[in-house]
């Protein structure tokens, strides 16, 4: 199978995101599942409140040390994945671990990681299930999306960056047919960020060795349900390749 050959299948409502041959070979046991959603704002749901969920998450982790959070088996599974893709999990903890350590182990829940109602809903679901989830504006996508390694020189403008940078070879990225969408599980791009104008999203969850497929799909379903407080959600077309 050459580098332009991918596996793709859809189980029920979930799409399995394609991977290049070298990603499949080097990251055995890693799979990414997604939901492509069409969103229509609800008149009575524009102020979706996740306060009870934030408080429940805080109650579960309040008073824990960073070391105790990092030692949870599911956290350790994603730490191993980070090491596989060349990231130092002590310097760059996986997203769920990072959110818990930054916001939810304090005695007082004095600050929340609020970004946008869609992103907030997805973060709540990720924290409830301890599965890293990502969401991005699907209308920025040109053609199919897939996971691949950079060949070197691809342009990428990370969130908050004023200008694109050229990426080195060998980074794991989510890309479409024209551009890099994210440094996978590490940093999203400006081009695909969720805004108030967003009406289509890809909601993604990553399975790694030591984590059951069912756990990833349950977390995606939870994200869908939470987004549904503010939006009517309809499944979009299969367009991941």
Image (cartoon, helix red, strand yellow):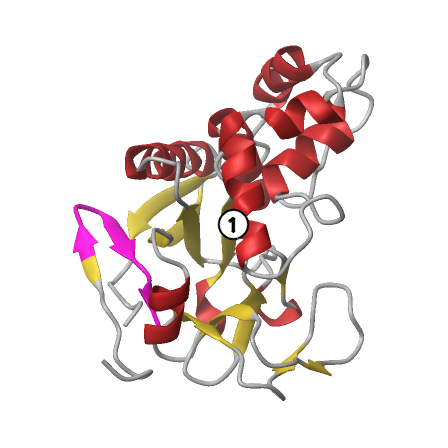
Q: Is residue 14 magenta?
A: yes
Residue 121 seen by the camera = no
| Residue 90, placed above or below residue 59 | below
Residue sticking out furthest to the bottom: 153
Q: Is residue 65 left or right of residue 178?
A: right
Q: Residue at x 42, y 51 (%)?
A: 204
Residue 115 seen by the camera = yes
Q: Secondary structure at mark 1?
A: helix
- What stretch of residues is rendered in magenta? 10-20
The N terminus lies in which quarter of the figure? bottom left
Q: Residue at x 62, y 44 (%)?
A: 94
Q: Is residue 11 left or right of residue 202?
A: left
Task: Find residue 28 and report its horizontal and vertical position in percent.
Answer: 35, 56
Task: Find residue 216 and report its horizontal and vertical position in percent.
Answer: 37, 38
| Residue 71, placed above or below residue 232 | above
Which of the pair 233/190 is nearer the observer?
Answer: 190
The residue to which callout 1 is attached is 81
Q: Is residue 164 left or right of residue 210?
A: right
Could you classify mark 1 by the number of other residues whose Cα lies within 10 Å: few (under 14), some (14-19), or many (20 or more)? many
Task: Find residue 237 and report its horizontal and vertical position in percent.
Answer: 25, 63
Q: Is residue 240 magenta?
A: no
Q: Residue at x 66, y 68 (%)?
A: 190
Find residue 127 and report its image quarter: top right
Q: Residue at x 51, y 25 (%)?
A: 128
| Residue 82, placed above or below residue 98 | below
């Amino acid at each position: 199978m050459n580098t332009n050959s991918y596996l793709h299948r859809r189980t029920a409502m979930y799409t399995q995101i394609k991977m290049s041959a070298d990603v499949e070979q080097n990251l055995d046991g890693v799979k990414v599942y997604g939901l492509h959603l069409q969103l229509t704002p609800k008149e009575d749901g524009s102020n979706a409140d996740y306060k009870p969920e934030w408080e429940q998450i805080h109650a579960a982790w309040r008073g824990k040390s960073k070391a105790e959070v990092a030692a949870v088996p599911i956290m350790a599974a994603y730490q191993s994945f980070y090491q596989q893709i060349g990231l130092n999990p002590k310097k760059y903890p996986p997203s769920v671990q990072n959110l818990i350590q930054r916001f939810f182990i304090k005695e007082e829940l004095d600050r929340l990681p609020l970004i946008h109602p869609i992103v907030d809903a997805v973060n709540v679901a990720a924290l409830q299930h301890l599965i890293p989830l990502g969401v991005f504006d699907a209308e920025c996508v040109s053609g199919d999306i897939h996971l691949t390694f950079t060949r070197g020189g691809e342009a990428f403008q990370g969130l908050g960056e004023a200008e694109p940078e050229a990426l080195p070879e060998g980074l794991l990225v989510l890309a479409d047919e024209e551009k890099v969408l994210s440094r996978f599980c590490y940093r999203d791009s400006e081009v695909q960020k969720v805004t108030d104008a967003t009406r289509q999203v890809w909601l993604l969850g990553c399975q790694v060795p030591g984590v059951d497929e069912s756990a990833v799909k349950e977390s995606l379903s939870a994200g869908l349900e939470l987004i549904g407080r503010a939006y009517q959600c309809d499944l979009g077309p299969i367009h991941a390749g």
